[in-house]
Structures are given as C-alpha cells and as structure tokens.
Amino acid sequence: MAIRRAESRDTEAILTIYNVAVVETTVTFDLVPRSHEEQIDWINDHSGSYPAVVAVDGADTVVGFGSLSAYRDRPAYTTTVEDSVYVEESVRGQKIGSLILDELIRLGVDHGFHSVIARIVGGHEASIALHRAHGFELVGTEREVGRKFNKWLDIVLMQRIL
C-alpha cells in the first residue's frame, strides 16, 4: 500500500468512494452525489496548501483518500484545518485509514498548520478510534446539527495540536 498526493487521474475512483458514502451512510452530510466536474474542482482545490492524498494498492488502484480543508473562512482560523478520511468498503479494517491520516498529519505539519479538527458523525466508532489512536482528543459534541435518512445526527469534535 502506498500513499501519494491525489491527481486528476484519481477523479473517478475518489468520486466512486465518496458517492457511496453520500448515498448509503451518514459519514458525510452531503445529500446529493458529486458530479464528475465537482470532483475535478475538489481535486484542484486540494492541490496546494490544503492537500488531498490517495491510498493505492500494488496495482495503483485507489482504495481510499483523505484531505485537509480549511476549518472556517475567517482569517484567524487559517492555521486550523479539518481532516477527512474515506476508505473503500471492501478494504476497511486493513489500517488504510491509519496510513492516510498519518500522511495528512505529516502534511499538516509540513504546511505549518497548528491544529487539526475531526468532525465525526456521532456513533461512528471506527473513525473516533482511528483519530484517538493518532493523538486526537474529544473536545465536544454538537447535538442534532444534521439530518439525513430521517434521523437527527450529532457531530463529535476531536482535535489534535500539531
């Protein structure tokens, strides 16, 4: 397994992994699958200070991805980022998410960020455990801030100072 920066050639693979999460899970609060053009824009937006990475197997097939994104728009937040990690369902449990998060943390340090926030849907114990294993601490819960599949959803906030 290798981790590398996301490139335009990864568009369809990332799109497939992400859109499955959109239509089948609550791990993203998006309600409508991304289009091909939106995914290209996302990759372009994550080619600089806010990087995106992919996990690829020996055949260079993308099996997961992750990114750092701006936490908030206001200038005082520029040293804080939010992470996202997605792994293709058939390969979960193989530490791929851990490899992706390791790389995102390394890139966060390299890019001079100070803090990483994880916003995780309540009850997603695998993601909470992943972040805890990488030094993130629980800092709060936002109650019933999202609604998907006719359910109110909490967000668990975790943070790591870099």
Image (cartoon, rainbow, N blue to C red):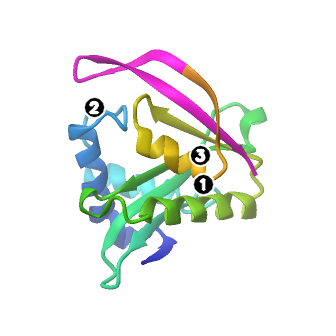
**First along the sequence among labels 2 and 3:** 2
Left or right: residue 157 compared with residue 9? right
* Secondary element type, mark 3: helix
Left or right: residue 35 compared with residue 124? left
Mark 1 Cα shell of 10 Å, populated few (<14), some (14-19), many (≥20): some
Badge 1 vs badge 2, beta-carbon distance below 8 Å: no
Above or below, 86 relative to 117: below
Q: Position of residue 77 (x, y in %)?
A: 73, 36
Q: What amino acid type should be assigned to the residue bearing mark 1?
A: Tyr
Question: Residue 31 appears in which quarter of the rendering?
Answer: top left
Image point (50%, 74%), residue name = 4
Above or below, 125 relative to 61: above
**Could you give the CA–CA distance between mark 1 and mark 3, rounded to whole angstroms?**
22 Å
The numbered dot on residue 31 is: 2
Question: Residue 124 appears in which quarter of the rendering?
Answer: top left
The numbered dot on residue 50 is: 1
Image point (34%, 84%), residue name = 58
Q: How many marks?
A: 3
**First along the sequence among labels 1 and 3:** 1
Q: Position of residue 75 (x, y in %)?
A: 75, 35
- Residue nearest the viewer, comparing 90 with 113: 90
* 154 falls in the magenta region: yes
**First along the sequence among labels 1 and 2:** 2
In this picture, which residue range is highlighted in magenta?
Answer: 142-162
Between marks 2 and 3 in the image, the one whose residue lies nearer the viewer: 3
